[in-house]
Image (cartoon, rainbow, N blue to C red):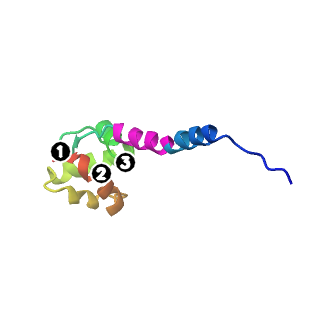
Amino acid sequence: MKLFRIPAVVLIAITLTLSALPSFAAEEAVVKEVKMVSLNTATAEELADALDGVGVTRAELIIQYREENGSFSSVEELLEIKGIGVATLEKNKDRIQL
């Protein structure tokens, strides 16, 4: 049985190339801009644009809640909106202002 030998230089080049790939993905995640949004002043479009898992329809429900109940006094009040649960609140807490 004849074995194929790969030169060490080629193996090192492949290893260095592959080891660099995860760092590119990590850098890309850091570059993502976090948009801040105010629950008490934002339009439906601004809310939908800034909040993950919140589309225009759900954003309109946030506006409707605000109009019927007054300004939000806590971020947790979002849980009163149909379709917004703890998971959605948790992934958006850092981008919400009152």
The x and y percentages for residue 31 are: 35, 36
The x and y percentages for residue 1 are: 86, 54
Q: Is residue 11 left or right of residue 93?
A: right
Tag 2, which secondary structure? helix
The x and y percentages for residue 48 are: 34, 42
**Which region of the structure is painted magenta?**
20-32
- Residue 28 on the magenta span: yes
- Frontmost residue, 45 versus 3: 3
Circle 1: residue type: Asn
Query: Residue at 67% of width from left, 40% of height from top?
Result: 7
Residue under label 1: 40
The x and y percentages for residue 17 are: 54, 39
Residue under label 2: 92
Is disc 1 surrounded by few (<14), some (14 to 19) or many (20+) residues within 10 Å? Answer: some
- Residue 5 on the magenta span: no
Circle 3: residue type: Val
Count of numbered badges drawn on the protein: 3
Quick check: marks 3 and 2 in contact, CB under 8 Å? yes
Residue under label 3: 54
Which of marks 1 and 2 precedes in the sequence?
Answer: 1
- Frontmost residue, 91 versus 54: 91
Q: Quadrant of residue 12?
A: top right
The Cα–Cα distance between marks 2 and 1, rounded to whole angstroms, is 15 Å
